[in-house]
Image: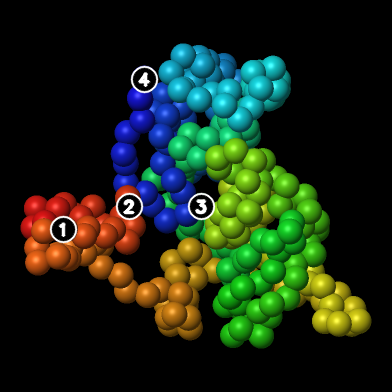
Amino acid sequence: MNNTKAVQKKPYFRWLSMSPVAGALWLALLHRAEAAEAKKFEPAQMRADYQIARPALEEAHPGLYRYAKKSDLDCVFDSAEKALDHPMDFFEFYRLMAIPIAAIKCGHTDVSLSPEARKEAESMPGLPFDVRVMDSRAFIFRDYAQAGALAGREIQSINGVAIGQIISTMLSAESQDGDVQTSRQGSIGGNFALNLIILLGLRAPYEVVLAGCGTGPAQAVHLAGLTHQERSTLSSKMYPQDHPKKDFASLKWLDDGHIALLTYSSFGTAVDEGQAFMKRA
């Protein structure tokens, strides 16, 4: 039974493939009249959503136990349900739900923020770096705080939280296929600044402790942070090589027109452009 559906992807977060779980989180949002961090949901509200999501997955997911034993997955889901014993804001509920969903180890079964909650998170000042995670270590790839001077430095802690704890928290909420860790580390690195806000609850200003250069001592830097839009604007100006222009797709004819070669550069983006291209093709 195939109950997945194609939806438009947004920056940083994928949309849920398993629509019942999406409904569970969206149900809570129907009652949201305040900012996600300000509005609190009662345990009964969250359990109602949870009791929609889990049975829907167990009934309809075609590969629920492909990579995880039923007993192990039941334990993770049971623990999450028991944790719904106190009021939470949207981000706290999201963090709790992301862990059992990620434990399924299916890259097409994912929890995502609503457009409103994502917009709220992206409006908050985030860490002014692009980060790469390798071998459970985090390195500054692009530095927007000091004009690139900190690029290549290793992060040891952020706001007093050790980088090992930060990475393990992000990995526990990252939905990818099977047990491949490189894809998980690549994904959390690409979403690092936003993950700090929504998964760790860390807020600006940021005190980042960097490993010393060579035999030098560790260095603490204090940062005000940048919004997602501010960081994106700086990225385009400072590192245009990170944003190569690609057409949505291309159509070429080979063998005197007997073979059509159709190439897509991406999926889930530029929907209007894609629809126009498909009509032309």
Residue 160 spot, x, y in % from top left:
80, 58
- The answer to which of 18 and 128 lies nearer the viewer is 18
Locate residue 266: give its quadrant. Answer: bottom left
- Indicate left or right for 281 with 157 as reference: left
- Residue drawn where x is 64% and y is 41% of the image: 179
Q: Secondary structure at mark 1?
A: strand
Q: Which residue is mark 2?
A: 267
The answer for how far apart the CA atoms under marks 2 and 3 are is 24 Å
Separation (CA) of disc 4 from disc 1: 34 Å
Question: Which quadrant, please, contains the N terminus?
Answer: top left
Discs 4, 3 touching: Cβ within 8 Å = no
Disc assigned to residue 1: 4
The answer for how far apart the CA atoms under marks 1 and 2 are is: 23 Å
| Percent coordinates x, y for residue 172 in the rendering | 67, 41
**Mark 4 surroundings within 10 Å by alpha-carbon count, few (fewer than 14), some (14 through 19), many (20 or more):** few
Mark 1 / mark 2, whichever is N-terminal = 1
Q: Who comes first in sequence, dot 4 or dot 1?
A: 4
SS assignment at label 3: helix
Residue type, mark 4 in image: Met
Label 4: state its secondary structure: loop
Amino acid type at image mark 3: Ala
**In this picture, is 27 found above or below 222?**
above
Mark 2 or 4, nearer chain start:
4
Mark closer to the chain start, 2 or 3: 3
Where residue 64 sits, quadrant-wise, is top right
Residue 121: assigned label: 3
Looking at this view, is 120 or 70 the one in front? 70
- Label ID, residue 60: none
The residue sitting at 46% across, 27% down in the picture is 21
Decide: few, some or many residues near mark 1? Use Cα within 10 Å; few <14, some 14-19, many ≥20.
few
According to the image, label 1 marks what residue?
A: 259
Q: Could you tell me how far apart the alpha carbons at marks 2 and 4 are, in whole angstroms?
A: 23 Å
